[in-house]
Image (cartoon, rainbow, N blue to C red):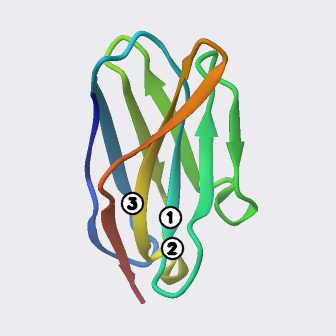
Amino acid sequence: QVQLVESGGGLVQAGGSLRLSCAASGSIFSINTMGWYRQVPGKQRELVTTITRGGGTNYADSVKGRFTISRDNAKNTVYLQMNSLKPEDTAVYYCNIVLVYGSIPVDYWGQGTQVTVSS
């Protein structure tokens, strides 16, 4: 069993900052990719950012220069620092990790945390 516990969401004014955290626990040997996705009602879940075990990152164009992903491999935790927030960043943010069993990747998801940016 693998559990992901997210924290750090909330309500913030436009231009403000929030920091999300996601801690993974359970039967984990080594986490491959960690990342954050977001979803608004009526739309598909979309990629925000990912980070590999070696620290390589990938960002959606809409958040480049404003959001920063980081991870602590010793703590199996991934973070998302969100600066210069905009109302369009309002969404439920989901943590994602990928574990590889043999050659088979398996995705695990957090429960989601609401981020609301007021104008």
Q: Taking 34 as reference, is 96 above or below it?
A: below
- Tag shown at residue 17: 3
Report the amino acid beneath label 2: Asp
Q: Are marks 1 and 2 in contact (CB under 8 Å)?
A: yes
Number of marks drawn: 3
Q: From the viewer's perspective, is 85 left or right of 66? A: left
What residue is rendered at 43% in x and 74% in y? Answer: 91
Q: Nearer the viewer, residue 102 or 55?
A: 102
Q: Which residue is mark 1?
A: 38
Q: Quadrant of residue 18?
A: bottom left
Report the amino acid beneath label 1: Arg
The mark closer to the camera, 3 or 2, is 2
Q: CA distance from mark 1 to mark 2?
A: 9 Å
Q: Which residue is mark 2?
A: 89
Q: Earlier in the sequence, mark 1 or mark 3?
A: 3
Which image quarter is the N terminus in?
Answer: top left
Q: Nearer the viewer, residue 7 or 99?
A: 99
Q: Residues within 10 Å of mark 1 (few under 14, many from 20)?
A: many
What residue is rendered at 52% in x and 87% in y? Answer: 42
Give the image location of residue 33, x and y in percent: 58, 29
Q: Quadrant of residue 53?
A: top right
The mark closer to the camera, 1 or 2, is 1
Q: Earlier in the sequence, mark 1 or mark 2?
A: 1
Dot 2 falls on a residue whose secondary structure is helix
